[in-house]
Image (cartoon, grey):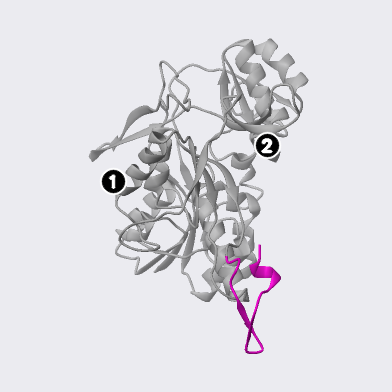
Amino acid sequence: MKILVVGSGGREHALCWSLRRSPFVEELFCAPGNPGIAEVADCVPVAAGDIVEIADLAEKLKMDLTVVGPELPLSLGIVDEFMKRGLPIFGPTRLAAQIESSKVFAKEFFKRHDIPTADSAICSSAEQARKAIKGYGFPVVLKADGLAGGKGVLIVESDEDAERALRLFFQERVFGAAGDRIVVEEFLRGQESSFLALFDGADTNVSVAHRDSTTVPTQALFLMNDPFLHTVTVSVTGPGVAEDRVKTYFGLRTISAVDLPGTTHRYVAINGTPVYLQLALDQAYHPDGYYTFPSDSVLRDEILRARRIGLNGLGEHIKIETPRKLYWADKLGVLIMADVPNWWGPPTDTAFKEHDDAMRAMIDRDYNHPAIFAWISYNESWGLLSKVNDKDVYLPETQT
């Protein structure tokens, strides 16, 4: 079989890893994938949200099956697009995917069909949410209605926490349209687990129950001068299956824009406090060559040098390095202003497409990375001459 997996995260990596082990899989592709997935599948630079282009790809390469990992393409109707073309795909339709893409839809569905769920209220303003919070008491759970990259659920335990959360939803709008409505939900205590069932309209195949949550006993916030990171070890096992352990880290912080005190000027803030940014342009230089992928120690030392000379941020020029550079920036307390890729040479249709594909793949991979506070999109081929009628001339497209 020839299979295409859609997505670029850990979930898709696990899918590709498992599919590669199957004796029935001859060719395996992933769009857009990531460096880890590239070890087991051929990655294609098409963003997961470009559902028409992904359908075109599956049609052109004659895929026997497409497997969708992320919620975003499902919510955009990728399955509907494939079904319209008669292409085989695994995943729910756009309407069915609402149970995952909309908390409001899910809550109303549960109540309509008498499915047990935590009591909740649907709120479209801070004032409505305050009344609901008062009714439930603390702790209480606030959830963005739409998709928020796994970041849209907040547990608040005091009036101060609640006001901070409501500012994020309704004033700073850090979740965008996904936070136009929120679900205020009673807090339930106990162990959380997930139970998956695959259904094709006739037969059902169920999985074992599993859970992927962890509790942080003392929550410490990440600050620029104290880049505190929690560490956690996750283990996966099951009946008759060897245990697999993964050690990872995470930080608790909010990057947003707030008014500087006494002004209406917007500025970058960490945990609601404005941060005076001291940045330098990082040309991604490496002594062994241009456009290389340096070693992990070189990436770490670049971030350490920035800290030693008093910087708390870097503008990553030309390209975002391997994800390890973002790891060290996160771990050592350096914010990243991410420049998307540029092109060199005449502004042809091919150049524009290559730039757009690279930009979309990069943002899809790193959009929610906690070290990145801004994205800068521009063509950096300024100053370059273009051939027009055998003459070297400057074009507006290359003088940005």
Helix, strand or loop under label 1: helix
**Which of 272 and 246 lies nearest the eye of the viewer?**
272
Give yes or no for residue 124 being in the magenta stretch: no
| Disc number lying in front (2 or 1) | 1
Residue wearing tag 2 = 105
**Which of 337 and 81 lies nearest the eye of the viewer?**
337
Residue 138 falls in which quadrant of the image?
top right
The reply, left or right, for residue 207 in relation to residue 54 is left
Residue 236 vertical placement versus 20 (above, below) = above
Name the residue located 41 percent from the left edge and 36 percent from the top edge: 309
Label 2 and label 1: CA atoms lie apart by 48 Å
Q: Range of the magenta residues?
A: 381-400
Residue wearing tag 1 = 297
- The percent coordinates of residue 203 (x first, y second) are 48, 51
Helix, strand or loop under label 2: helix
Residue 135 vertical placement versus 237 (above, below) = above
> Can residue 249 be seen by looking at this rendering?
yes
Name the residue located 65 percent from the left edge and 28 percent from the top edge: 168
Residue 162 vertical placement versus 46 (above, below) = above
